[in-house]
Amino acid sequence: MSPPTKSQVLRTQYEAWPYPQVPLLAALPSTHPFELNVAWLWDRSGSGPAPAKPRLWIAGCGTFQPYAFAVANPRAEIVATDLSETSLRIARRRCAVHRQKHVQFAPVDLGDAATWPDGQFDLIECYGVLMNLADPLATLRGLRQRLTPRGVLRLMVYPHWSRQRVFQLQRLAQLLGLTATDRHHPALLRSFVRALPKAHPLRFAFTTYADSRNDAGVVDGFLHAGDRGFTAFQLGALLRDAALVPGYWFHRPWAQPDTMAQRLQFPDRDQSFVLNYLDLWQELRGNFVVCARRADAPPRDVQPATAHPLFAGDGHALRHRLRLARLRLLGGRVPTRTKDGDVVLRAADVRTLQREEHAAALHDSGLVLGGRDHGPRLPAHVDFADEAGFLQHTTALRVGRRAPNPLFSHLFAAFELAARHPELRLPDLESQLGRWLPWADPLEQRPIRFGLTPYGTCQRYRTNVLEHLARGALPTAASWDDTRLRHDAEALGHVRSLLRDHGELPARAHTGGELRELAVLLFTHDQLFLTFE
């Protein structure tokens, strides 16, 4: 019997654990998802005025996205598809409960284009899906063919460097024998990680992960059957090879490539370089979300300034009109996804918008469309020719006295990139730290004094890191079985004792290498360097 395909494995996971886990009656105020409105996304992406009744495909919709997009686009024709029938059933029920009747549902395997819906779409939403597919490029090329000439594809993928702690937690779960196939395992992982010291970076990563508080979120984040991250260079190449170009980065202002290039003195670089640098230094603080257009789309179109359609004019449903009336009288707040904090609206601002005027002060709120080009100005992508070699270097198990601790290998990647790849024209580490000084936002604070960001870690271990960069290359081991820690027997004994204390974990025989890897993941968070024999 042949092994199951990746699609079959993922279908099984999401049938058992539909995601996200959101109460069915949880309501989304009608003004809140204004940045998911097709007219807003077209404007930010440079596609000009959107159709009055756009056609929208949510490719991999999960249990909640159809409702959110239906609220944001009350006049759209929406097709919501997913691999999981259970997720579709929940999404359909949610839309029925909230009286969103303009959504059609269908089971679709994005790895099989024969199952896709017919026709072209003005907006395709593919959020958190591409990194689960066996052939992301083939799927992306197919999605591009389904875009109308000015259509927008909103795509989210996990970043490689910023998600390393999640990948380490996934590895920890594998070593503990925890999987998505057992109903008790999400709770076991939660209990195990929460028992780690408060200063442990893996505990920090788990407890600050919003979905870790529910079992479906733990499965999707930490017991996943096969996700991955993309570096910004990999994402840039993927878009290029699929004949797509970034139209707008759906990021907070600090994570916009043009803003970062200016602040960190990289004016002549491409978007991939700048975003990769942000990700590498753990300053992205989110996923890669890009609104892409076809490479053969018409030139960018900046339309005349006009009020956001959800805040202007008549013709809305009664509940939405009542909400606007309240804002018109009292003002209020509207949450954003691409800005830091909420948009604070005075009652007068709302009245201005409803008269379809566009006061200059409202342009930066996101509630005015047109009037300016919001797209990136940097070139889209230039290849990092030896990125594969650099990624291999960062995952290599280096041995010897004072070798980089594998728990912090992604931080050492930030320290070492300039010296290893002079063709990238980065300044030395000291100069990079100087450029970061006004802008870095280290996460480190008591009880975690290092290990969360390269900048915060280097502030504490600057001399040690510079000494490490000055010395020669260390040898590498092929596997954990080929190494020995200092006080190896004691470390392995400590792991065995901890596993006995957690007797509810699945019983399994660990190799010496697996115990050694567990020892590093669990007990070395207070050591930036280790000695491997």
Image (cartoon, rainbow, N blue to C red):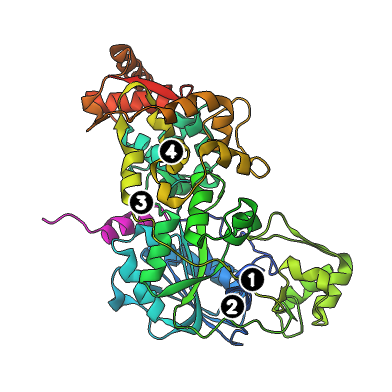
* Mark with earlier residue (4, 1): 1
- Alpha carbons under labels 2 and 1: distance apart: 7 Å
Q: Earlier in the sequence, mark 2 or mark 3?
A: 2
The answer to whether residue 155 is above or below residue 405 is below
Q: Contact (CB < 8 A) between labels 2 and 1?
A: yes
Residue at (62, 77) in percent of width and height: 43
- Residue denoted by label 1: 374
- Mark 1 vs mark 3: give the one in front: 3
Q: Is residue 444 left or right of residue 166?
A: right
Taking the spot 50% from the left edge, 58% from the top edge, the residue there is 288
17 part of magenta stretch: yes
What is the crowding at mark 4: few (fewer than 14 residues within 10 Å), some, or many (at least 20)? Answer: some
Distance of label 3 from label 4 (alpha carbons): 13 Å
- Pinpoint residue 430: horizontal percent, then vertical percent: 56, 36
Locate residue 346, reporting x and y percent: 86, 65
Residue behind mark 4: 416
- The magenta segment: 1-18
Spatial CA distance of label 4 from label 1 is 34 Å
Query: What kind of residue is marked 1?
Result: His
Marks 2 and 4, Cα distance to the nearest angstrom? 38 Å
